[in-house]
Amino acid sequence: MLYVRFTTKIKTHFLIDLFINPLIEIGKIMSYQQQLERIKNDTGFIAALDQSGGSTPKALRMYGVEESEYANDDEMFAKVHEMRTRIMTCDTFDSGRVLGAILFEDTMDREVNGKPTANYLWEDKNIVPFLKVDKGLADELGGVQVMKPMPNLDALLDKAKNFPIFGTKMRSVIHTATPEGIEKVVQQQFDIAKQILSKGFMPIVEPEVNIESKEKAQCEVLMKEEILRNLDRLDDDQQVMLKLTLPEEAGFFSDLINHPKVLKVVALSGGYSRDESCARLEQNPGMIASFSRAFTEGLSKSQTDEEFSATIDASIDKIYNA
């Protein structure tokens, strides 16, 4: 008979591997399934709180924080986290109307009310957390901007597994109706989406069409063709989410909304005002909002808590009803 003698340290690690880690994995699977059902079946919108390095100064200025109030990136991100914390902890930022929230990596790494941000959102608010994973846009070429390379994507996704992150979000931009460029944008989005799916996350594919494009409607036609082509290439058990600019033609994305490989189609505001975004959203049944600037429009650092809460409530209510 073979006897195995454990030191206390080895025995502890063995017991953790044998009993605790499987329980953690089961808990993650259950949490993911609950989040999946919430996104699939519940009503509401997804708040985009994922401004990163390039867009953060503008977001802070709109909130009333000038660049003179911070000296470096660390201080800037601390300021924007204060703003996001104020939004997330506001009573009117509630799960009855807010389905999810998209976070920047720095936000995921920080805490809200003593908990990691994603844990606070999911455990305390029942709001599904997503993570922005792209590293920004490459220079425009062929009428489009693809995403910059993401050599550390696997490492970022592995880190995200430490939190109740449900899915990811990544953005490209289409400026003109060039078939080759649009094919390149959509193909890159789906190639990376497959990498994300393999890690157990739900990818939000976001090939944004520039609202200022003189060929916006033509861009949308070409983009939808490429999206449908790539959806057909996914495995039968795979789904993605789509985040798309509100279209020129009402109901134009209905075939994407009803596609079996699409969990949800969400709309980005793309620079439209809240009123314009909501008016367009009302014309596209089945799409839900995932607004950033249109959501935080009107919020100010100088507002009292009561004023801030009322502004958030009015914004959420208008977007939710749309």
Image: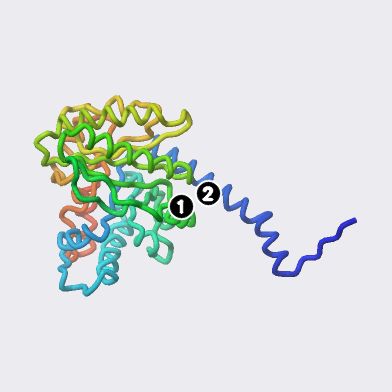
Whole-percent x and y of residue 124?
42, 55
User: Left or right: where does residue 305 sit relative to residue 36?
Assistant: left
User: Left or right: where does residue 254 sit relative to residue 201?
Assistant: left
What residue appears at the point 33 percent right and 51 percent down from the top-left corner?
149
Of 191 and 5, which appears nearest the observer? 191
> Within 10 angstroms of label 1, few (less than 14), some, or many (20 or more) residues?
many
Is residue 132 among what the camera can see?
no
What residue appears at the point 67 percent right and 63 percent down from the top-left corner?
13
Q: Which residue is mark 2?
A: 28
Residue 103 in the image: above or below residue 174: below
Q: Which residue is mark 1?
A: 164
Whole-percent x and y of residue 310?
21, 54
**Amino acid type assigned to the residue bearing label 2 in the image:** Lys
User: Left or right: where does residue 310 sit relative to residue 156?
Assistant: left
Q: Are marks 1 and 2 in contact (CB under 8 Å)?
A: yes
> Within 10 angstroms of label 2, few (less than 14), some, or many (20 or more) residues?
some
Of 140 and 114, which appears nearest the observer? 140
Counting residues from the N terminus, which is met first, the one under dot 1 or under dot 2?
2
